Image (cartoon, grey):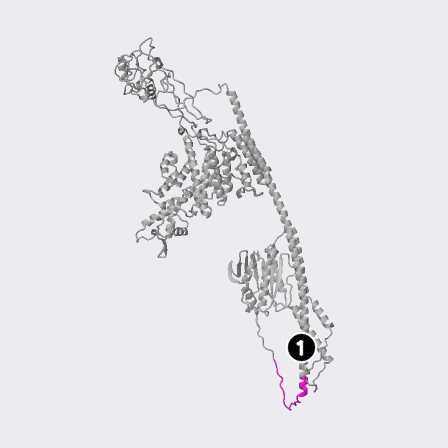
C-alpha cells in the first residue's frame, strides 16, 4: 500500500452515504472515486469497505457518471498526478519527519590528497622545543626522559582541548570520530627516541658511528601495538611525505644489507603501514606507492632469507605481513576504481594475491569482477595459469613439472617466481604423493634421482635426498643408478620444514640491485580520479511525497551528509518546474470535472544526475578581484614556503656534512696522535726491556765463565795431584823391582826385533753423501710472507749440490720449456717459491722479484778466488738492475774453505750477506744444524728488513738495531778474545809449585827394616809443575774453542 493511502487510513472515516462526499468503497454509485491501479505511486483501490481515502473537511459537488465512466477507462500512466490542488477540495497536507540515511548505507570517506593537512601552530612549536631540549642534553638519559614524560602529559591535555586527539578511554561512536592527522616531520618521533635511549632499545642500525648513541638521522619509528595504550598524538604519527622519505631511506641504505637487516626492515615497514592506518585510511598516491614497495620488500626478503639459513628467521611471519600489506593495497585499488581512477601497477599485485592465496576459493570469483584490462594482463594470466597447474581440489591438473618449468622460464617475472617459492615444499609433496599412486606397478622403474630433481625444481640432488630423508622415502640402487622409491611415501605434508629456496632464480635479477627490484613499476603520481567523492542518500520509494507541491514531476533527491564530513561537494537543487494549469474550475463557478491532465508519457525512474551548471563567467562575480588576490597570495606564500624549505634543507645538509667532516678530521687526528704516542711508548719500553735482558745475559755469561774457569782449575789441580801420586807409586815400584830382580845377560848373536806399531786406517766419510734428511718440514713455522728463493750452484753433479737438492726437496720440472729444479712451500700465512737457474736463461726473468739467493761455492783447487768474486759481483749486478732494489738476503754456502773469506767487498743497503762454512769432514748432525739454523734465521728476519716505517720509528729502530748489534759484537769479541788465555798463562807462570809429602810404600804396620824409603828431589817437582801447567793450558784452550 502506498504512503498516501496509509496517511489517509489514519484519519477519521466519514460515512460513504453522506451527500456529495468522497469515500472509499465499491465502484458503484455516485460520488465514488474511480478505480485506480496504484502504479507510479497513485491511490490504490481497497477491497473492503472504508479502507483508504482522504480526510473530508467540507462537502463538494457530485460527479457526473459519464465523466466517471470516461475516466475509468484511462490508466495511471495517462493521468499523471491525480489532483493538482487537493486543498481546494478540503484535503490538508500531513507533515512527515524525514528519515536519516542508515549508517550502514553511508560510504566510507577516503582521502586521496593531503592538501588538507595543516600542522597546528602550538604542536609545531612544541616539537621544536622538544628537539632543542634533546639536542642540548648531554647527561643521563633518565633525567631527560622524566622531563619529557611531564611535557607529554601537558601536550596530551592541549591536544584533547583542541579536539585533535580522542580522550583516553572515552566512548564515542564512529559518527563523532575526529579526522586524525599526523604532524611528525622526522623518521622517528622525538619522544620515542628519548624513551628508547633510556630503555636501551636502540638497534645498531640507528646508532651514530661517531658517538654510538641514537641519532635523529638514522633512527626510524618502531612498531608498537595500540592495544592497552593511550591514543597516539599527532606528533607521534608521521605525515605521508615523511613516510615516503622513511621508506626510501630503508630501501636505499638498509635493503642492500640483507640478510642482516631483515628483522629491522620487517619491523619498520610495519610501523609505516600503521601510521597510514592512523590517518583515517589515507589512500593517496603516497600510500599506494609505499604499500607496493613494502609488498615487494617482503617477497624479496623471503627469497633472500631462505638462502641465508638464519635460524631466527620465520618465513610464516614474513608471508603474514605480506598478506596484510596486500590486503590494504587491494582496498586502496577498489577505492580508486570506485572514483573512476586507475592504478598502473594493480595487475602486478592482483597476480601476487592469486599466488599467495592458493587455497582461497573465493578469490577465483572475485577476480572475475576486475576490469578487462587487469584480468587480461600478461602477469595475471601467468598467475592464473600457475594457480591452475597445482591448485588442490576436484578436477585439478596436477601438472607439477610444467609448474616448475614456468617458474624457471625467463619470461616469468622475478618477484612472481620468488613468491611461488613459498609453495615449493607443499607442491613437491603433492607431486610425490601423485607419483606414489602412478608407480604402483612393479614393472615400472622408479624415477632416477637426477630426473626427479629436475622435474621438481631442486637445485641439486642433495636437496632431493634431504627431502626424501625427511619423509622417510628410501633410496635404492638399480644397475648403478640411484632411484627414489616414491611408492613408499606414507606421511602427510609437514609444514615445519626449512623455508624452500632456489638459486636458479637468481639469474633473473640480471645484475639488478635490490633497490632496483623494489622500486620497479610505474609511479602512482596521477590516479586519474574522475568523480569527486561524495555521500548521497539512496533514491526514495516511488510515491508522491509532496502532493501539495505545484509540480507534477518528482524533485531530485537531496544528498544527506553526516555533519562531521568536510569539503564534500553537494549538488545544487534543480529549479522547480512551473505548475500546469488545473483542470478543475473553482467550486463557486463550475462543477469539478475528473478529466485529469492531458496524457503524458510514462515517467522514467528518477536518476541522480549532475544538473547543468549555469554559464556564468567568473569575471562577472563581484568578489572576483578579492578572490583572485587571495589565490595569488596563497600561491606566492606556497611557492615561498616550498623554496625556503628547499633552501633551508640544503643549507642544513651542507652544514651537517661540514660538521661531520670536521668531527671526522678531529677524530682521525686524535686517533693518529694517540697511536703515535702509544707506539713510541711501546717502542721505548721494548728497547728498555731488551737492554735489560742483554745486560742480564752479559752478567750471567760473566758469572758462568768465572765459575767455569774456577771449576776447570779445581778439576785440573785434582787430576794433576792424582796423576802425580800415581806416577810416584809407579816409580817406587819400578825402583824396587830393579833392585830385587837378577841381572839378565843377552846371549851373543841374539837380535831383538823392535815392534812396529802402525796407526789404524780410518775410513774417510763424506757428510754430504750420508745426510738424506729434508729440512722443509722444519721451515714451515717460519714462512710468513710470499717469498721467492733462487738457488745457484756451479753444477748439480757433485755431492754438495745433491745434498742441497735433498734438503730443499727440489724436483726437476720444466718452466717455459727449460729444465729447472723447484719446490713450493705453502702455509696459511705465506708461500716460499724455490727455483734454480736453467742452463740458458734471461737475466730479467730470473733475477726479478727475488728475496733470497742461496749460492753454493766450493774452495778452488788453485786457491785463486778471483773467479769466484767475479761470479758474486755479477749476481749482485743482476739483482740491482732487475730486482728494483727489493731487500735481498744472500746466503753463501762455503764448502771446504780453510779460513774466513770476504767475497762481497761493499754490500749495498738492500743486501744482507750470511756466510756458512761447511766441510765434508764434519759430522752429519753439525752440517744439518748449521744449514737449518741459517735458513730459519733468514726466513724469520727477512720481514723486519723489508718493513717500511715512518721517519721517527725508523730512526728509533735503527738505533735499537745498532745497540743490539754492538752488544752482540762485544759478546762475540769477549768470547773469541785470547786475553783469557793469556791471563791463564800468566797465572800458571806465577803460581808456586805445591810441595807434596813424601811418597813411600812404608805404612805404619810395615816393620822398620829394609831399604824401601824414597825422598823427592828438585828435578821431580819441576817436571810435575810443567806437566800440570801444560794440561791446564790444553783444557782451557779446548773450552774456549768450543
* Magenta stretch: includes residue 413: no
Q: Which x, y percent locates residue 1011?
A: 70, 86
Locate residue 466, reporting x and y percent: 40, 51
Residue 730's place in the image compared with 76, above or below, is below
> Magenta part mainly helix, strand or loop?
loop
Q: Nearer the viewer, residue 676 or 215?
A: 215
Circle 1 — which element?
Answer: helix
**Magenta stretch?**
734-757
Q: Residues within 10 Å of mark 1 (few under 14, many from 20)?
A: some
In the image, residue 906 lies at what x, y percent? 65, 59
Q: In this view, does 292 lie to the left or right of 662?
A: left
Question: Relative to 362, does residue 873 appear above or below in the rendering?
Answer: below
Residue at position x 44%, y 20% in the image: 615
What residue lies at 50% left-to-right and 20% top-to-bottom? 624
Relative vertical location of residue 168 with respect to residue 938 in this rendering, above or below: above
Q: Would you identify the image quadrant in which residue 372 lies?
A: top left
Residue 668: give x, y in percent of width and height. 61, 45
Q: Name the residue under label 1.
A: 723
Q: Nearer the viewer, residue 266 or 816?
A: 266
Image quadrant in which you'd find residue 702: bottom right
Left/right placement of residue 892 relative to residue 468 reads: right
Amino acid at each position: 500500500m502506498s504512503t498516501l493511502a496509509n496517511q489517509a487510513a489514519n484519519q477519521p472515516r466519514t460515512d460513504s452515504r453522506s451527500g456529495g462526499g468522497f469515500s472509499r468503497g465499491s465502484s458503484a454509485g455516485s460520488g465514488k472515486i474511480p478505480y485506480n491501479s496504484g502504479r507510479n505511486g497513485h491511490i490504490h483501490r481497497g477491497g473492503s469497505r472504508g479502507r483508504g481515502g482522504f480526510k473530508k473537511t467540507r462537502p463538494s459537488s457530485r460527479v457526473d457518471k459519464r465523466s466517471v465512466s470516461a475516466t475509468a477507462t484511462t490508466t495511471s500512466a495517462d493521468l499523471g498526478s491525480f489532483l493538482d490542488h487537493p486543498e481546494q477540495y478540503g484535503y490538508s497536507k500531513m507533515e512527515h519527519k524525514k528519515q536519516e540515511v542508515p549508517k550502514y548505507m553511508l560510504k566510507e570517506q577516503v582521502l586521496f590528497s593531503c592538501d588538507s593537512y595543516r600542522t597546528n601552530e602550538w604542536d609545531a612549536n612544541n616539537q621544536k622545543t622538544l628537539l632543542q631540549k634533546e639536542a642540548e642534553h648531554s647527561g643521563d638519559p633518565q633525567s631527560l626522559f622524566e622531563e619529557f614524560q611531564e611535557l607529554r602529559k601537558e601536550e596530551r591535555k592541549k591536544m584533547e582541548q583542541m579536539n585533535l586527539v580522542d580522550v583516553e578511554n572515552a566512548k564515542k561512536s564512529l559518527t563523532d570520530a575526529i579526522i586524525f592527522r599526523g604532524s611528525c616531520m622526522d623518521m622517528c618521533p622525538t619522544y620515542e627516541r628519548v624513551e628508547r635511549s633510556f630503555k636501551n632499545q636502540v638497534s645498531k642500525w640507528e646508532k651514530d658511528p661517531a658517538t654510538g648513541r641514537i641519532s635523529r638521522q638514522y633512527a626510524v619509528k618502531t612498531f608498537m601495538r595500540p592495544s592497552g595504550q593511550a591514543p597516539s598524538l599527532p606528533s607521534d604519527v608521521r605525515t605521508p611525505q615523511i613516510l615516503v622519505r622513511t621508506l626510501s631511506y630503508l630501501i636505499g641504505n638498509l635493503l642492500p644489507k640483507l640478510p642482516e637487516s631483515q628483522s629491522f626492515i620487517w619491523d619498520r615497514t610495519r610501523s609505516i603501514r600503521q601510521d597510514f592506518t592512523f590517518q583515517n585510511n589515507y589512500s593517496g598516491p603516497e600510500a599506494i606507492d609505499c604499500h607496493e614497495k613494502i609488498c615487494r620488500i617482503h617477497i624479496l626478503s623471503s627469497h633472500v632469507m631462505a638462502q641465508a639459513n638464519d635460524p631466527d628467521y620465520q618465513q610464516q611471519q614474513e608471508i603474514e605481513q605480506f598478506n596484510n600489506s596486500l590486503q590494504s593495497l587491494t582496498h586502496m585499488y577498489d577505492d580508486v576504481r570506485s572514483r573512476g581512477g586507475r592504478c598502473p601497477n594493480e595487475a602486478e599485485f592482483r597476480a601476487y594475491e592469486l599466488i599467495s592465496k592458493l587455497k582461497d576459493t573465493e578469490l577465483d570469483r572475485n577476480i572475475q569482477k576486475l576490469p578487462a584490462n587487469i584480468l587480461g594482463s600478461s602477469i595475471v594470466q601467468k598467475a592464473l595459469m600457475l594457480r591452475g597447474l597445482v591448485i588442490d581440489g576436484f578436477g585439478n591438473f596436477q601438472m607439477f613439472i610444467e609448474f616448475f618449468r614456468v617458474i624457471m622460464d625467463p619470461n616469468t617475472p622475478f618477484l612472481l617466481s620468488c613468491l611461488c617459492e613459498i609453495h615449493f615444499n607443499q607442491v613437491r609433496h603433492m607431486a610425490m604423493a601423485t607419483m606414489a599412486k602412478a608407480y604402483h606397478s612393479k614393472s615400472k622403474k622408479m624415477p632416477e634421482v637426477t630426473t626427479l630433481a629436475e622435474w621438481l625444481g631442486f637445485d641439486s640432488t642433495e636437496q632431493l635426498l634431504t627431502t626424501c630423508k625427511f619423509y622417510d622415502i628410501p633410496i635404492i640402487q638399480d644397475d648403478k643408478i640411484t632411484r627414489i622409491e616414491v611408492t613408499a611415501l606414507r606421511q602427510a605434508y609437514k609444514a615445519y620444514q626449512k623455508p624452500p629456496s632456489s638459486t636458479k632464480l637468481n639469474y633473473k635479477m640480471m645484475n639488478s640491485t635490490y633497490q632496483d627490484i623494489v622500486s620497479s613499476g610505474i609511479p602512482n603520481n596521477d590516479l586519474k580520479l574522475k568523480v569527486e567523492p561524495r555521500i548521497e542518500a539512496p533514491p526514495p520509494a516511488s510515491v508522491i511525497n509532496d502532493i501539495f507541491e505545484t509540480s507534477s514531476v518528482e524533485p531530485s533527491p537531496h544528498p544527506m551528509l553526516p555533519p562531521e564530513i568536510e569539503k564534500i561537494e553537494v549538488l545544487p537543487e534543480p529549479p522547480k518546474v512551473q505548475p500546469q494549469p488545473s483542470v478543475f474550475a473553482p467550486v463557486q463557478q463550475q462543477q469539478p470535472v475528473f478529466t485529469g491532465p492531458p496524457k503524458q508519457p510514462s515517467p522514467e525512474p528518477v536518476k541522480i544526475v549532475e544538473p547543468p551548471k549555469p554559464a556564468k563567467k567568473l569575471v562577472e562575480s563581484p568578489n572576483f578581484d578579492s578572490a583572485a588576490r587571495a589565490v595569488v597570495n596563497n600561491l606566492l606564500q606556497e611557492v615561498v614556503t616550498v623554496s625556503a624549505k628547499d633552501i633551508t634543507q640544503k643549507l642544513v645538509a651542507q652544514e651537517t656534512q661540514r660538521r661531520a667532516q670536521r668531527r671526522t678530521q678531529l677524530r682521525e687526528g686524535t686517533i693518529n696522535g694517540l697511536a703515535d704516542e702509544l707506539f713510541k711508548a711501546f717502542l721505548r719500553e721494548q728497547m728498555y726491556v731488551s737492554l735489560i735482558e742483554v745486560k742480564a745475559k752479559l752478567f750471567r755469561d760473566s758469572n758462568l765463565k768465572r765459575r767455569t774457569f774456577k771449576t776447570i782449575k779445581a778439576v785440573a789441580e785434582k787430576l794433576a795431584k792424582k796423576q802425580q801420586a800415581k806416577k810416584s807409586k809407579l816409580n817406587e815400584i819400578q825402583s824396587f823391582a830393579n833392585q830385587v830382580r837378577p841381572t839378565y845377560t843377552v846371549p851373543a848373536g841374539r837380535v831383538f826385533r823392535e815392534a812396529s806399531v802402525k796407526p789404524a786406517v780410518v775410513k774417510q766419510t763424506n757428510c754430504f753423501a750420508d745426510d738424506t734428511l729434508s729440512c722443509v718440514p722444519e721451515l714451515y713455522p717460519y714462512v710468513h710472507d710470499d717469498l721467492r728463493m733462487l738457488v745457484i750452484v756451479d753444477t748439480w753433479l757433485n755431492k754438495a749440490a745433491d745434498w742441497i737438492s735433498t734438503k730443499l726437496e727440489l724436483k726437476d720440472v720444466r718452466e717455459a720449456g727449460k729444465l729447472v729444479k723447484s719446490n713450493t712451500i705453502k702455509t696459511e700465512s705465506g708461500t716460499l717459491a724455490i727455483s734454480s737457474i736453467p742452463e740458458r736463461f734471461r737475466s730479467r726473468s730470473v733475477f726479478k722479484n727475488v728475496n733470497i739467493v742461496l749460492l753454493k761455492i766450493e774452495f778452488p783447487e788453485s786457491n785463486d778466488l778471483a773467479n769466484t768474486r767475479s761470479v758474486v759481483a755479477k749476481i749482485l749486478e743482476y739483482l740491482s738492475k732487475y730486482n728494483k732494489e727489493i731487500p735481498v738476503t744472500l746466503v753463501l754456502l762455503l764448502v771446504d774453505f780453510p779460513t774466513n773469506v770476504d767475497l762481497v767487498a761493499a754490500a749495498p743497503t738492500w743486501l744482507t750477506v750470511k756466510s756458512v762454512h761447511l766441510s765434508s769432514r764434519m759430522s752429519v748432525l753439525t752440517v744439518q744444524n748449521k744449514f737449518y739454523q741459517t735458513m730459519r734465521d733468514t726466513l724469520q728476519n727477512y720481514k723486519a728488513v723489508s718493513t717500511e716505517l715512518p721517519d721517527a720509528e725508523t730512526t728509533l729502530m735503527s738505533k735499537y738495531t745498532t745497540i743490539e748489534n754492538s752488544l752482540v759484537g762485544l759478546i762475540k769479541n769477549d768470547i773469541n778474545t785470547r786475553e783469557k788465555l793469556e791471563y791463564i798463562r800468566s797465572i800458571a807462570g806465577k803460581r808456586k809449585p805445591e810441595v807434596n809429602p813424601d811418597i813411600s810404600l812404608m805404612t805404619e804396620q810395615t816393620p822398620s827394616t829394609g831399604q824401601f824409603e824414597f825422598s823427592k828431589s828438585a828435578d821431580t817437582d819441576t817436571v810435575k809443575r810443567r806437566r800440570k801447567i801444560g794440561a791446564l793450558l790444553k783444557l782451557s784452550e779446548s773450552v774456549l774453542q768450543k
